[in-house]
Image (cartoon, helix red, strand yellow):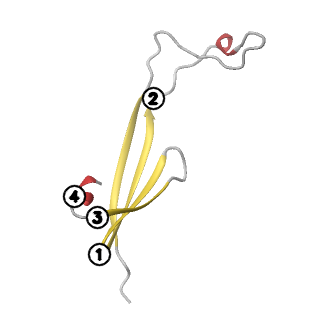
Amino acid sequence: MVEFVEDGYELVSVVAPSNQTRFYFLRKPGKVVKCREEAGLDGPLPTIPPSALALPAGQQTALLTTPGADMPKVHVDITCAELVRPER
């Protein structure tokens, strides 16, 4: 997406249909580009033992920690394509 911005494209709008996906629309005179950004985890989240979910009476929130558990890495994939008007 950086290449398009460096080539003079301007951001027109961002659409986020979910927490993991965003669409970016960029334009410059006579041209439009649509980019898709998708985020995901590289592996499962660590399991939380049921005993960690039990809160003492009167407590509404808790910080859950899983000592020694490896948190998965987040990856972001971005793909872009120039949109072309069909010829009439």
Tell me which label, 1 or 3, sits earlier in the chain: 3
* Residue 10: quadrant of the picture: bottom left
Expressed as whole percent of the image width and height from the top left, the position of residue 65 reads 54, 14
| Disc 4 target residue | 6
Mark 1, secondary structure of its residue: loop
Q: Which of pointers 3 and 2 indicates the residue nearer the eye?
A: 3
Q: Are marks 4 and 3 in contact (CB under 8 Å)?
A: no
Check disc 2: other Cα within 10 Å, few if <14, some if 14-19, many if 20+. Answer: few
Q: Estimate the x, y position of residue 67 in percent, counting from the top left.
A: 49, 9
Label 4 SS = helix
**Gap between marks 4 and 3, in whole Å?**
7 Å
**Side of 48 relative to 87 (left or right):** right
Q: Quadrant of residue 85?
A: bottom left
Q: Specify the farthest residue to the right.
A: 57
Q: Which residue is mark 3?
A: 9
Amino acid at circle 2: Gly
Q: CA distance from mark 2 to mark 1?
A: 42 Å
Identify the mark at residue 43; answer none if there is no mark: 2
Q: Quadrant of the N terminus?
A: bottom left
| Left or right relative to 4: residue 11 | right
Closer to the observer: label 2 or label 1? 1
Name the residue nearer the viewer: 80 or 13. 13
Contact? badges 3 and 2 (CB < 8 Å): no
- According to the picture, the residue beneath numbered tag 1 turns out to be 29
Mark 3 lies on a secondary structure that is loop
User: Which of disc 1 and disc 4 is earlier in sequence?
Assistant: 4
